[in-house]
Structure formats: structure tokens, C-alpha cells
Image: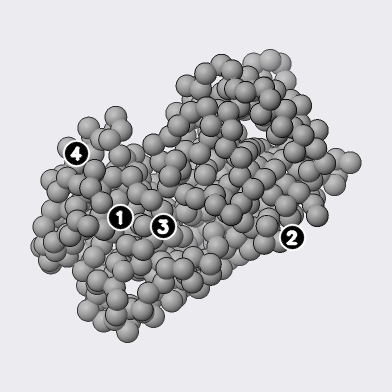
Amino acid sequence: MKSIGIILGRGVEGCGVSKMALEQAKWYAKNGYSCSVFANADKSWSRKESHSFDGLDFHHVKFSDESEIENILKKCLGMEYVIIDSVPSKSHKEPSIGGFNKLVQDIKSPIVFVQLDHSIHSIVRNAGMMEAVDKSDVIFSFGVDNDFSRKIKKEAKKVGKVFDKEIFTYSVGFPFDEIRKQYWKPIEEQDPLANRWIGRCSGWKGYKLMFDFHSKYLKPANYATVFEGIERSPHYLTFKQTGDFHYHIGDNPDSTPYQAGEDPYVFGIYNNHEMMERMSVSGFGYQLSILKPRFITNQIEYTHCEIVAAGAIPVFRKAWGDIALHRTLNIPLTQCQNTGTIWLDETNNQSAFDQLHKLANDPIMRNEWREMAFDFYKNHQDSDHVLRDMHNKITNKLSTQE
């Protein structure tokens, strides 16, 4: 049996990087590969319990421990290739960074580097990134002219080199059918008044737009709004000035009832499984992230996919859909037909609310829309499409280097 390795140099941070490694490992196992995930345990992250690696060949070990690095190197011998999904942060201690760098340099199998950071502000906090890029045989990024691409070309130029490795674009893979089977509920079990935003306490995740939409449209019409994923980070100081809300960051959303027609209810970091159960009985799910155009090719984020697969009506930021191109149609998502999506922006949202209000009061139509959304986004970003595409790009690239 062929084998694949996945390295999380940053550790289990519990956000998109962890989810990507999890879905990659599941896809490889489904397609006849043996897959091992090696995550750095030298630093603990607040969201480390968000996703479960149970049932996978998962090794959570200290990269600062030389014996653990040797064990990983032994396990990687003979692998078809090894994927690096993340590198340590500069806040990792030097022995941990050194262990990661040794691992990268001593791996004998081909290395695939996957960059999941968007902004330069995140990228400059990485340690060991250029070492990993230099050793890599195949490189993936969300764009070919984004901050990552510019950074590695700039770093090469500093030492008198021209960076000439090809950079492939990609999307994160999501198992739509598997998640639907686990969470999808009959339309009668959903609360059509419930509007649930998921994300984290970062401005680009779009919480301000959610506050605005709630105060102007949802609250006056007696709907309920719930935020999930708001942690007490430094950015929380900005978040709490955005609007009035019921503070429940330390409370369990399952045992804290929310009321329609009031200020939003704000909860903290969530366990993914528990959040998905709550999303599955909500009428509408919100993912309102926005990035600059150079960061987006055709991808949507995991939280977009989760809302759709849980069976809530997706309410997505129009500006993202205006940029992201459909995988096969090659036109912006907002120009596609039968998406089952309510597109929200910063300007006139009366039409978006009218659409939402009509759906909330028509369960037959709402059920038709969520089925449309499921079919549309499954076609666009299911694991069987995008992770297979990544695998094919990797194997084709490696075959030309032999």
C-alpha cells in the first residue's frame, strides 16, 4: 500500500489548517493510501479541541525531542510524498523550530508544501517557511500573486536567486456527502428565525456586517442572531465596540437559550461537532469573510462548506462570491444559477432580507433552496474533486522531475 505523510509544524491550532490535514488524511485513506499525520505538540493552542483526529494514524509529539524527529523520519521512509501543511510559529521555542528544520532537511521522500496563510501579517510570523519552500518539490498556494508568492520571491532575491518554482493554486477539500449524512435534519426541525454566524474574532471574518444586518433588518423583524467562535483575543476589544450583544463567551450554547428580537447572543470557541449540530437546526448560516482579490482564486472556506452541508440556508458575503470563480464554469459564484445562496454586502441589503424573510415563512421553498445549495457547492468544492486534483498535480509534477 502506498503511503503519504502530513506534517503540522505549527501543531493542532484547530482552525483551517487542522481541518485541511484532517480532510486530506480521510481522503487518502478513502482512496487506498496509508496516511500518517505528525503534529507538533510543543505549543498548545486554544482551539486544539475543535477537530478530532480519532480513527486516523495521528502522532501528536514534541518536535523539540530529537528521538521523536528520528521516529518521524523512519516512518516517512519510502512514502510517495510528504505534505507540509504548516510550519512552526516564531513563538515556538528554538528546539522546536530546530526539530522541524531537521525533519524537513532529512526527509528522503518528495516534499509538498501547502501554504494556508493568506496575509503577510500571518506569513511573517512563520518560522522555517523558507527552509521548507526551498526543500519542496511541489508548492500550493491560494494564489500565484498573493502575499506568500511575493514573499518567497522577495526572499530569494535577497540572496541573489530567482525563484522559479511553479506555484499551483488549490481549494480546501470538503466531504459534503459524509457531513450531510451526519448532520442534515428535516426542515420541520429547523428554527426559521435562527441566524447563526460562525468564525473567529478577526475583522476579515465579517462580524461587523453581521452586526449591521442584525440591527437594521433581523432584530426589527423579530429574528434571532447568534455568533459562535468569538474568543477573548486582542481583537476582542474592537469586536465589543462594534455593537451591543448578550455576552456568553464562557457559556455552553446548548444550554443557553437565545431570544428572537433582541441583541445578538455571542459565544466563544466551539467544538466543531457540537456547532454543526446547532447549525443543522438553524434556518440560516452566515459566513461573511472577505479578503483582497489577490488572495482568492476559486476557493471558499471550510465554514462556507459546513453551513451548506449542515442544511442551513447559506448567507455569504457577495464580495467574496464576486471574486471566487466556479471550479468548472470559470465565472464568479454570484453569476452562477441555482446556488441556493443569499448574497450579502455592505450596501443595499433590503433585497437580501426580503429573500430571507420569504424563505423563513415558506418551508417548502427553503427546503428546495438548501438542496440547491448542497448540489451547487458539492460540485464546486467536494474533496473528490479538489483533493484528487491536488494529488494529480503532485504526481504529474513529480513524474517530470524523475
Residue 273 badge: 3
Q: Residue furthest front?
A: 67
In the foreground, 271 or 192: 271
Crowd around label 3: few <14 · some 14–19 · many ≥20 (10 Å): some
Amino acid at circle 2: Gly
Comparing marks 3 and 4, which lies closer to the viewer? 3
Residue 32 badge: 2
* Residue at 75% across, 38% down: 76
Q: Residue furthest right?
A: 402
Q: Disc 1 and disc 2: Cα gap in Å?
A: 37 Å
Secondary structure state at the residue bearing disc 1: strand
Secondary structure state at the residue bearing disc 4: loop
Crowd around label 2: few <14 · some 14–19 · many ≥20 (10 Å): few
The image's colour scheme reads one colour
Residue matched to label 4: 240
Secondary structure state at the residue bearing disc 3: helix
* Residue at 49% across, 65% down: 179
